[in-house]
Image (cartoon, coloured by chain):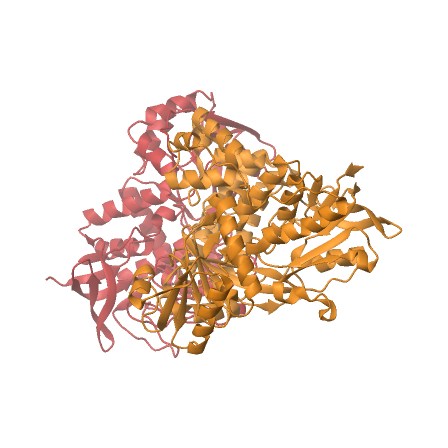
Chain colours: A orange, B red
Amino acid sequence: MEKATVVVIGGGATGLGILRDLSMRGVKALLVEKNDLVNGASSRYHGLLHSGGRYAVKDQEAARECIIENQIMRKIGKSCVEPCGGMFTRLDIDDESYEELWVKGCADSGIEATPITLDEAFKLEPRLSRKHVKSAYLVPDAAVDGFRMSWQLVDSSKRYGGQVKTYTEVIGFDTVSGELRGVKVRDHFTGEEYEIGCDIAVNAAGGWAGFVGKIAGVEIGVQPDKGTLIAFNQRIVNHVVNRLHKSSDGDIFVPHGSITILGTSSMSVPDPEDTSTSREEVESLLKIGEQTFEDLRDFRILRTFAGSRPLYIPPGGAVGRSASRGFAIVDHERDGLKGFFTIVGGKFTTYRLMAEKMCNQICAKLGNKTPCRTAEEPLVEEVPQADKDRAKKFFPSYGVNLAATRLGVERFKKVVERLEAEPESRELVCECENVTRAEVEEICKDDTSFIVNDVRRRTRIGMGTCQGNFCALRAAAIFSDLGVEPSAKNSLERLKEFLQGRWKGIRPVLLGRTLRETEMTRAIYELSMNVTGGEPQ
Amino acid sequence: MKISDVIVIGGGLAGFMAAAAAADNGQKVSLLTYGSGSLPLASGAIDILNSKAPDEAIKLVLENHPYKKIGLKNIDAAAKFFVDVTNKSDLHYVGRLSAQIPIVTAVGTLKYSCLVPESMDATNLADKKKIFVVEIKGLKDFYAAMIADNLKKYFPEKIFETAKLDLNLLGGRDITCMDAAQILTGNEQILADGLKTLNATEDDAIIIPPILGLEGNSSRAAVKSQLRAQIFETTCLPPSPPGIRLQRAFIKFLQSAGVRIFENSKVVRGVVEGKKVTGVVVENSVREKIFRAKKFILATGGFYSGGIVMREFDNPIEPIFDLPVFYPSGAEKWSNKNLFSDKPQNFSMTGIFTDENLNPIDGDGKVLFENLHVVGANLGGVDKIFERSAGGISIASAYKGAIL
């Protein structure tokens, strides 16, 4: 039987943070995830590295945690953080007295909030509404790429012996007189069921934590809270732009590379799998967004997406600190299940701190005295400049840096070597994100690449400007050569699946320039390619 | 300035066709274009309708269908005129309204159209013994193995062979079909020599990406004459050489017919007097200019080309004349859950309604402008992509709008 000291359940930022922390402390840890990694709230969010400004009035403890972790993330995850800075703007319709509270809250929480004149604000953010914006402050917000940071967590964990199994779902727990002995899992592709022996299991399943708890026979109060976001095809803002008012829907814009993300709504949903979005949610986000940026509707929307925040509801408020902190750790020994923990709630910005606290508790149980080092050691080594220079022959320099941070030192080196040796491997499979055939082939070889979408998330093919119009064909063809699952061979099905996946996020925003893109998709794939393969009626 | 007989607004298939038909009819024509039109995106084949006998099926279309307003006689005449125009520009098209011709797509399915470039006509594929699918080293978007794999489903009894030719096209950057077609123009011998190495016989077929030049038929003729096997071009991802060939064939025809083409001329609004359009205002970088004519043809396209725009939900707009736009309202009716399915996408039905003269009408059926004719993709009422009528509606409405 396979064995680990600790099994971590859930492949989001929290779970991966725990895997890394434990591995660095020398604890043999294995992470299981029922889907692909980063499939929940860790990628389905703003990509905002909070300064804490948003919590400065309501929850200063959270605000303080944010500003501390914000500084740590910039250090350990340098290549995943875009230090664009943040701006809080109060509009004419916002409560003026809140501004005072907020300024004081920031000062009390250790967040530097610098007032700027409106002239300066309009200079920094030319698209801000001249009509509505009344005051502005700069704060140290930043943008963070949840995908990249999570993949770097995996690489870091693996370096210390951590293991990851994706598409591996927990179906039961093996206990002997109230003590955990192992976790029973099922392989999504083969259907094979087996047990992984362990002393401790951590339920870090986010919105799914309640389901995992149920399997273990314990009650966990987690309420999935759906947030819908809109990705625009342009960089509308230079900074993270927040509304200076009591936190509400649709009041944050975050720039990421060449796009901007606007969000979010907040809606309790029964099922964390519910990532549906509707025209009403989109319309409501746009209405709020255009108060800050009046010409918002002139920008092409790439797509909309949604994720579920795992909000922790303590049983009768008993576990007190959770409500204010935003996250909670539960030792289920109290429920008669020794060796089983749950960590729930929180936000991406503080995932490392959550992991540290969780691992402190686990290590205390294990008698492991190694201190946590996750705040000091960078996630990955930097890709050597010499390798980047070699790659510049094949990419624009912007693309070099993206590929370097996506791939990491070793894979990047291999890819560059292939680009040099085989001219054919230089083919840009995805022009929007500068992804070469060599990179796609390298990622296809990875032990977490099973389906086209896994490769998509890793390489970002299909996630840029064309939303798959061009790369869907290429991905289907390449994957039918390299795919590990038998169904990869059905290239037409894979191609349609790929485009259907994109369509899910496009359908609720089918207006403006997005309509134009969709007509192009249909013209290419229905008219020029006849992908439905139909004969005349 | 001189007043034209006809001003055509739009440089896509419909605009070109309207200008060609009007000029052929002895009219003095000005064509105003902005951008490159949608032809470089197109397969090059002209779909008429998804039916085994399109001419019969056209008779059965519903009241709001553009074909109903155009009439079978005009559709038939338009198809013949289209083939004439292309022939005169040395781009050979084959086909008729009563039957569908298969062509091989870049994913290896068959696509059926009424009017297709001779270089793509795959009718004879069924008679071949062996089918070679040939990719070119360094040319992207053409994957022989995938094409052969999917094509086998149509021809399970045939022998398939894939091959990869090295034509030394690699230059350190990606080569698209358009690049290859450009490189091979005047250098066809490289391709002919490469294809000869397959040793294909007259019983065989050779399927290649559409790289036989960007103009007319000469590149194809140069390669074809040296091979015993028949070569077939597939469709491809944009930019599409067969679409560009068609675009160039039209431009050649228009120039010889005396049509004045004004490029980079964005029409921003119409000048109207009562039920008559007297001019259109064109905006360029420095000033506005009014173009006047007796008759105007609006061929500005649909959502893709900006002939119809929709900035807010449930509020599509025709930006030049502010014509009423028909659309299905509400989120549920707007689109289907699946991108591809057995149902039309309603949002694609968005467009302008006309009477039988292709004059735009309002909700009560009242004609708005008597000398304005709406043609092409901005016509509403049907999902032209789903029912495979986009090309047919473009050429036929343009033809009728021009000769009225």
Say which quadrant the N terminus of chain A sits in. top right
Q: Residue B340, position in %: x, y? A: 54, 54
> How many tags in the picture?
0
Viewer-nearest residue: A47 or A70: A70
- The answer to whether residue A36 is visible is no
Query: Residue B289: where, in percent of width, then height?
Result: 16, 63
Q: Position of residue B99 (x, y in %)?
A: 47, 49
Compared with residue A321, is residue B21 higher up or lower down, i.e. above or below?
above
Answer with left or right where residue A149 lies relative to residue B208: right
- Residue found at the very far right of the displayed protein: A177
**Visible residue check, residue B287:** yes
Seen in the picture, residue B347 relative to A448 is either above or below; the reply is: below
Residue A12 appears left or right of B5: right
Q: Which residue is pictured at 53% across the width and 31% down the height? A: A410
Please provide percent x and percent y for residue A343: 68, 56
Asked whether A329 or B278 is in front, the reply is: A329
Toward the viewer: B275 or A420?
A420
